[in-house]
Image (cartoon, rainbow, N blue to C red):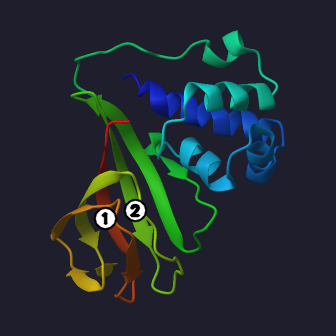
Amino acid sequence: MSNDVILQISNRIKQKRKEGKITLQQLAEYVGVTKGLISQIENSRTIPSLTVLLSIIKALNVDLNDFFENLDVSDSKEPVVIKASQHHIVEKEYTNGIYYYRITSFKHQGKLVDVVLHKQEKNAKKGYVSTQAHELNYMLKGKAQYTIEGKKYDLEPGDTFYYDARKPHLTKCTSDEPYEMLVLYFFDEE
């Protein structure tokens, strides 16, 4: 299976930054953007402009040709099997007790779709966040509560929740065990 090119670029940026022992803050300062933007780029939450992407590559001290070498840009229509061992955790600096495991990302009708397994522990602390996407969440285990514009939405196993994640939202685990949900992010066109 061909991973989406955007996901490959995001992962490559993170890999090269870590190999160079460069912090998010250091990279952001060199490029002239915020640490949050670099984090969003590395986690495929936003697509950098060409200028920002080239500045990141330069800051990572990587040859441009080497950076883009071996990107898989094929568009296979074959069935896809993704083994559990292929999932990888998406690191977010502002979370503790909250985990994101990327299953896959792909383009559908020109839009990026990100498929993630999201887990959150009962006492995990995270403030309001927003994402440049719409989300479809399917609760697998535990219970969760979303707060959006002052309104609370309680979710239990088997519930589906679709919303505009561009609006600031707060999640919390309301069960003793961590909740788990399958999340599909439908990113807006840039």
Name the one closer to the observer, 111 or 87. Answer: 111
The residue located at (22%, 25%) in the rendering is 79
The residue located at (34%, 87%) in the rendering is 175
Q: Is residue 157 left or right of residue 190?
A: left
**Residue 83 appearing in the image:** no
Three-letter residue code for mark 2? His
Three-letter residue code for mark 1? Met
Q: Position of residue 50 (x, y in %)?
A: 57, 25
The residue that mark 2 highlights is: 118
Which mark, by number, is residue 92?
A: none
Q: Is residue 56 left or right of residue 186?
A: right
Name the one closer to the observer, 123 or 176. Answer: 123
The residue that mark 1 highlights is: 181
Q: CA distance from mark 1 to mark 2?
A: 5 Å
Q: Is residue 38 above or below residue 77?
A: below
Name the one closer to the observer, 48 or 90. Answer: 48
Tag 1 secondary structure: strand
**Residue 156 appearing in the image:** yes
Q: Position of residue 128 (x, y in %)?
A: 46, 74
Q: Is residue 107 left or right of residue 86?
A: left
Lower position in the chain sequence, tag 1 or tag 2: 2
Tag 2 secondary structure: strand
Image quarter hosting the C terminus: top left
The reply to whether callout 1 and callout 2 are in contact (CB within 8 Å) is yes
Q: Position of residue 71 (x, y in %)?
A: 53, 17
Quadrant of residue 188 in the image? top left
